[in-house]
Amino acid sequence: MFGWRSAPIRYIDRLTSNSFEPAHAAPFDATRGTKLQLLLHARKDFLSIWREDDFRSKIDSIQLLGRKIVLVNSPEFIREVVVKRHENYQRKSPQMRRALEVLLGDGLFISDGETWKNRRALVSDIVHMNRVPSFGPIMQTTAQELVQRWETLPAGRTINVLHEMAGLTAEIIARSVFGNDLGKDRADAVTDSFTKYQSLIDSINLAYFIGFDNGLPVMKTPSLRSSVRKIHGIVDKVVEDHLAGRGDHHSMVDLLIRRRQRNPELKLDVIALRNEAATIFMAGHETTAATLTWAWYLLSRAHWVEKALHQEIDRVCGDRVPTMDDVPRLELCKAVIEETLRLYPPVPILARQNMKADRLGDIDIPAQSLILMVPWLLHRTPELFEDPHLFKPERFMNGRKPIPYSYIPFASGPRVCPGLHFGLTEAVLCLAILARNFRVVVPDGHVAIPGARLTLRPQDGLPATLERRA
């Protein structure tokens, strides 16, 4: 399985005239050190602890202190975990639950059992793919507002693309979920607070490995409390406005409130409403912001793809702003987003905790073990994807699709992200609107080092300048 990296991390970033291998840590070439050292290193950089052999379609295990860890990197066994034996593996890992419970309470993303069953159908209905077209005008208008703001920036001004995309997606999700303009100040406050929150969270939770089956709660430092308080304050105000009748009657929160009134057995009190609204909001804006940021990085390097993308947008949309109706014809735009999600899945680690002892393949799995499905590894497995480290959007074009359960950027099975269609459509439409007007130019030589905390972002953001398209 994985091993200890004692040497400095080396990042690979290779560009030729017609191929691009974007930034990723090289497989470690040292095996010295203890398992405890491995665990401590994973707290700092989870994506650099993998050996070359880990990028194979297989199932493997390791005993780490008092806990068994099972790496499931095979479509066959991923299907077993997320579909066929879902009831036993439905629970998110203690690491993820503890890391997010301070912010999301018992929200759908980290809940299980009856709470998950009740809320899943509710949230899925609200963000169902059939509702997505109704949010198209919001996505289009908000992206076009960013175009107009970018047009006012002085030539050569450096921007942080991650911050720009987070502000954009926060505003879109605010208008969709809450029916209210968030405003730049509050959007920035949410973005900055969640960035701070991620930096303060211990995503490993050492207590789990020394015997605490549910880990231990995170330490609520003053900085952590401040970040949560700012986010909750914004979400609470909007929920309260809706309860008082001041909300938009077409927003997602209004749908939640009306369902609460029709179905009191769901027990959606004000706290539960806040938790679900916060879950939809945080998951909805953060993952799409990260995806768009990585897409700009990839396009800035792979100029042949960027050129073809501009040609597609011009051909499909002419001299008008792309709309929701154009999305099905923007095949390359969608392929760029799908390939971005393959290389840089927003949640690079999907971890579960089995309720009962089980056996997968030839591996016995005690109850309360840690089951790791790692899209970062799975999506870069040579048996599943040709040239797995290269940026090749064409692998998603002309009807080509990955092997089932080999491509899981939104998870899979009953716990697949309910906002999948919303997020994918949003990313494609925003990419088309912004790329129609601008090239996002990342400085030559800049390596966008991937950093995995709760989500996968470029470490320290992504600096770039904007170049107007004629």
Image (cartoon, rainbow, N blue to C red):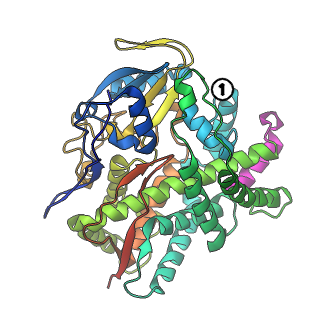
Q: Which residue is mark 1?
A: 113
Quick one: 125 or 68, which is closer to the camera?
Answer: 68
- Name the residue rendered at 72%, 55% in the picture: 229
Specify the farthest residue to the left: 17
Where does residue 50 sit, x and y in percent of width and height?
31, 36
Q: Is residue 97 above or below residue 135?
A: above
Q: Is residue 200 above or below residue 188?
A: above
- Taking the image as shown, residue 282 lies to the left or right of residue 311, namely right
Q: Residues within 10 Å of mark 1 (few under 14, many from 20)?
A: few
Q: Is residue 412 visible?
A: no
Q: Secondary structure at mark 1?
A: helix
Report the quarter where the C terminus lies.
Answer: bottom left
| Residue 39 on image: x %, y % | 43, 33
In the picture, measured across the screen, residue 32 lies left or right of residue 80, that is left
Tell me the amino acid under the disc marked 1. Answer: Gly
Which segment did they paint magenta? 252-268
Q: Residue at x 49, y 69 (%)?
A: 164
Residue 162 painted magenta:
no
Residue 70 is drawn in which quadrant? Answer: top left
